[in-house]
Image (cartoon, rainbow, N blue to C red):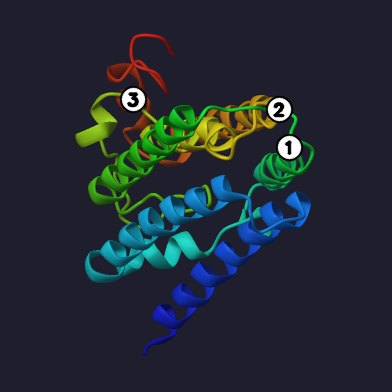
Amino acid sequence: MNNLIRKTILGFIQLHVTLGILLFLPAGSIRFWQAWVYLGVFSVCNFLITAYLVKYDQKLLESRLNAGPMAEKEKSQKIIQAFTGLFFIGLFVISGLDFRFQWSQVPLYVVVIANLVITLGFLIIFFVFRESSYTSAIIEVTDKQKVISTGPYRIVRHPMYAGGLLLLLFTPIALGSFWALLLFFPLGIVIVLRLLDEENFLSEHLPGYREYCRKTRYRLIPLIW
């Protein structure tokens, strides 16, 4: 087993254990069934994408493992990523507290639909990874990097953020919490700030990116923005 695979497995386990702690500890119970369903969907989707990268694009997999505020090279992104992580954690903690204190009553069919939309979000992310090997977890321009304008990049300039935001928007609902949705809005704002900062960086450092922006008008949502 090479070092990359070992690091990938360890990261996979750490992520899911952390999510479990963030959900079940505030919930005060392992009978938080929405969390079990969510973690099942999240784990399967994450595993399938990771398995694809292990087989077809280990270079991208390696770049995705180098993530977080400390991995960023730009000071602005370090700050943005720190707030992103804070609001991301809050999303799960409040969902757990919501289960404990029964603040929300989300119907079963709504939870099911939310998990289906989350699966769609992961599918969008998979298409992005399949189309581009330059989707690093940090904002950077690597040697020989080129502008990708095919696949989902023909529709919006940031399809990965689109898929990720879709996933995050429906996460509280899948976890049975309407109150945790309040955390999505500041989380969405910092992600948009990251997106705009990334566009400025790429426009300055990636040849052809300005032309791509003029050709592909919409950033996240087709026909809207």
Separation of residues labelled 3 and 2 (CA atoms):
30 Å
Quick one: label 3, few (<14), some, or many (20+) residues within 10 Å?
A: many
Determine contact: label 1, label 2, CB under 8 Å: yes
Separation of residues labelled 1 and 3 (CA atoms):
35 Å
Instruction: Identify the element where label 3 is drawn.
Output: loop
Identify the residue under disc 2.
179
Where's the C terminus, which quadrant? top left
Identify the residue under disc 3.
156
Amino acid type shown at disc 1: Asp
Please identify the quarter of the rendering in which residue 213 is found: top left
Identify the residue under disc 1.
98
Please identify the quarter of the rendering in which residue 113 is found: top left
Name the one closer to the observer, 178 or 52.
Answer: 178
Determine contact: label 3, label 2, CB under 8 Å: no
- The answer to whether residue 79 is seen in the rendering is no
Q: Of the two numbered discs 1 and 3 on the same chain, state the one appearing first in sequence.
A: 1
Name the one closer to the observer, 189 or 216.
Answer: 189
| Residue occupying the point 71% across, 45% down | 96
